Image (cartoon, grey):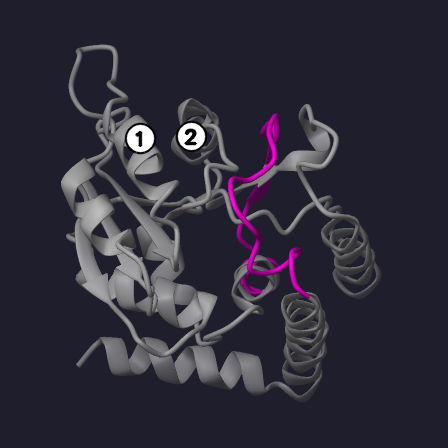
């Protein structure tokens, strides 16, 4: 609970047995000013792990769901389907790259009026090697495209973020892979939502090899996913399909 708002946390994870227990434990140990748990519900999606990621997360206190189809977006969607009703959804990766206590900054931004709060790593302190060169360059390219196409200042597509649950529902998230984060940010802009960037620190290298920046397949997949998502969302906006799709989704939600 944060400022009277229920908070749910979501983590997509694959082969993170060395990290996920610490991530879950650190987040669930956080409390508010009255000593109550900050996180009201925590769902980890074990995305086809070949190790004991799910068991480690469960032992640390999270609820576990399984999704064998690989993909960052589909793992997030699977976890969201299992999440209890909350007011704010917090997304945090399972590789210990995020500082758990800094989620308060994201929650404060949302409680203060933002619909979506992005943990912006370039605005915080960054240790050498915390982000790979492809990740840094990819973020810069995507940020420049968003500024060019939507006149929105952006510095990061960081996975550490918080969003109002009702705003997330309105975005009608669809991407099942690497385009998930940029889809959320661009759709929020298209809906006229208030998007805030909050400085977060990257003070350590992730433990183990990154699924994105640590492999050629991950780098290519993420790059194509992000750029293609930006192109698709711009095309839909230009043709009016995004507005019609959103209206249809809202109409369906009334039934």
Q: Picture quarter containing residue 60?
A: top left
Say above or below: 34 vs 146.
above
Residue at 44 percent across and 47 percent down: it is 93
Say above or below: 113 vs 193.
above
Which segment is the magenta one?
Answer: 187-215
How far is mark 2 from mark 1, CA to CA? 9 Å
- Tell me the crowding category of disc 1: few under 14, some 14 to 19, or many 20 or more residues within 10 angstroms, Cα based: many
Q: Closer to the camera, 6 or 240? A: 6
Task: Give the side of residue 254 with respect to residue 92, left or right.
Answer: left
Residue labelled with disc 1: 27
Q: Quadrant of the N terminus?
A: top left
Residue labelled with disc 2: 103
| Local SS, label 2 | helix
Q: Closer to the camera, 148 or 50? A: 50
Say above or below: 157 vs 178.
above
In the image, residue 210 lies in the stretch drawn in magenta = yes
Residue 202, given in percent of the width and then of the height, sits at: 61, 31
- Tell whether label 1 touches label 2 (CB within 8 Å): yes
């Amino acid at each position: 609970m944060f400022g009277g708002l229920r908070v749910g946390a979501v983590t997509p994870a694959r082969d993170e047995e060395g990290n996920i227990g610490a991530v879950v434990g650190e987040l669930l140990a956080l409390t508010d000013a009255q000593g109550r748990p900050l996180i009201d519900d925590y769902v980890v999606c074990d995305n086809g792990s070949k190790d004991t990621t799910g068991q480690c997360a469960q032992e640390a206190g999270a609820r576990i769901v399984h999704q064998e189809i690989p993909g960052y977006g589909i793992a997030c969607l699977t976890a969201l389907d299992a999440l209890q009703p909350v007011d704010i959804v917090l997304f945090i990766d399972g590789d210990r790259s995020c500082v758990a206590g800094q989620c308060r900054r994201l929650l404060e931004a949302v409680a203060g009026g933002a619909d979506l709060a992005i943990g912006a790593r370039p605005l915080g302190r960054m240790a050498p090697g915390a982000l790979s060169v492809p990740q840094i360059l990819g973020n810069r390219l995507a940020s420049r495209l968003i500024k060019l196409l939507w006149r929105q200042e952006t510095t990061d597509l960081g996975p550490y973020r918080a969003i109002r649950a009702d705003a997330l529902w309105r975005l009608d998230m669809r991407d099942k892979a690497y385009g998930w984060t940029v889809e959320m940010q661009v759709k929020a802009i298209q809906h006229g939502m208030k998007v805030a960037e909050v400085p977060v620190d990257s003070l350590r290298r992730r433990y183990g090899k990154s699924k994105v920046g640590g492999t050629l397949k991950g780098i290519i997949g993420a790059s194509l996913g992000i750029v293609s998502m930006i192109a698709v969302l711009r095309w839909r906006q230009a043709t009016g399909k995004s507005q019609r799709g959103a209206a249809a989704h809202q109409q369906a939600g009334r039934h």
